[in-house]
């Protein structure tokens, strides 16, 4: 009788430990935290801005925007009933999302449009969570989204990029102090909001040089008959709008 109880306890041990971990994560994620000081919020905005404007830092950090860009293409495909075939992330910060379905129509338009506006809209959602006080919950949500995205990655560099990003977020949310977790959440949000704008300008520079004939804007032009420049302007309008609205939520400024 003692042996049976011991075996049962032993077999239940790992599951109990996993349950404890999941419970801890859930509790931390759904528990609002006090907002940080305005100085810290502005400092994280300054850090994000430096990363976006300083070319060497931007070249490395842009992979985060590419992840959000390609994930947004994938989400657009799924929401419009297309079959998502896979996502590739490349070392030059480019990416490719492959979906299968009708070659024209609203589904293709939404899928193509989602890429450049996606990082800004993700940043806007993150700003809303910060406004509600869920800084830690935001970090765990990003971990969960990266885990889902990992299932669609189809190349080694993409796999490495997602694993590095996810591991960094898990380390922050599990091991670091709450103040540091909050700072990271604000820095990531500011980076998504600010970093969503620069690729739109880069896109138009490439288009003006004839180097982006297969870009999302030119694809949308072929699908709709609306000029590519107008699509670039719409990308810019959405990303700037997300930055202004998200920034006002973070700073507590009424528009």
Image: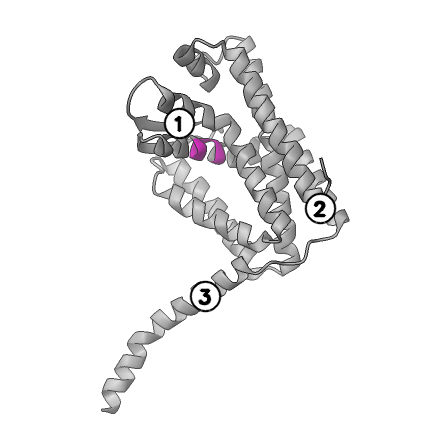
Label 3 – label 2 distance at C-alpha:
29 Å
Q: Nearer the viewer, mark 3 or mark 1?
A: 3
Residue 184 shows up from this direction: no
Residue at numbered disc 1: 96
x, y percentage for residue 83? 29, 31
Is label 3 in a helix, a strand or a loop? helix
Label 3 – label 1 distance at C-alpha:
36 Å
Answer above or below: position of 108 versus 10: above
x, y percentage for residue 167? 48, 51
Q: In the image, which disc is placed on residue 17?
A: none
Question: Which segment is the magenta one?
Answer: 68-72
Which residue sits at x=63%, y=38%? Answer: 246
Labels 1 and 2: the sequence-earlier one? 2
For the N terminus, which image quadrant?
Answer: bottom left
The reply to whether the magenta stretch includes residue 70 is yes
Answer above or below: position of 202 versus 171: above
- Left or right, 159 with respect to 217, comes to left
Residue at numbered disc 2: 41
Is label 2 in a helix, a strand or a loop? helix
- Left or right, 170 with respect to 43, comes to left
Q: In the image, which disc is placed on residue 23?
A: 3
Labels 3 and 2: the sequence-earlier one? 3
The reply to whether the magenta stretch includes residue 66 is no
For the C terminus, which image quadrant?
Answer: top right
């Amino acid at each position: 009788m003692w042996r049976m109880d011991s075996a049962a306890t032993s077999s239940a041990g790992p599951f109990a430990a996993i349950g404890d971990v999941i419970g801890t994560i859930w509790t931390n994620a759904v528990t609002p935290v006090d907002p940080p000081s305005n100085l810290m919020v502005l400092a994280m905005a300054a850090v994000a801005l430096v990363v976006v404007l300083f070319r060497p830092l931007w070249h490395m950090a842009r992979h985060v925007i590419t992840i959000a860009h390609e994930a947004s293409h994938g989400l657009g495909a799924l929401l419009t009933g297309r079959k998502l075939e896979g996502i590739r992330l490349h070392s030059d910060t480019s990416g490719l999302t492959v979906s299968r379905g009708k070659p024209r129509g609203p589904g293709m338009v939404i899928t193509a449009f989602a890429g450049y506006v996606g990082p800004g809209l993700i940043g806007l959602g993150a700003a809303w969570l910060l406004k509600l006080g869920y800084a830690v919950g935001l970090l765990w949500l990003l971990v969960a989204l990266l885990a889902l995205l990992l299932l669609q990655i189809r190349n080694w560099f993409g796999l490495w990029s997602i694993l590095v990003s996810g591991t960094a977020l898990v380390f922050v949310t599990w091991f670091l102090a709450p103040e540091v977790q909050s700072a990271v959440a604000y820095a990531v949000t500011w980076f998504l909001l600010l970093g969503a704008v620069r690729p739109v300008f880069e896109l138009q520079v490439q288009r003006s040089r004839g180097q982006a004939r297969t870009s999302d804007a030119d694809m949308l032009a072929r699908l709709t008959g609306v000029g590519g420049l107008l699509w670039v302007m719409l990308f810019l309008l959405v990303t700037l709008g997300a930055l202004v609205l998200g920034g006002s939520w973070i700073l507590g400024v009424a528009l």
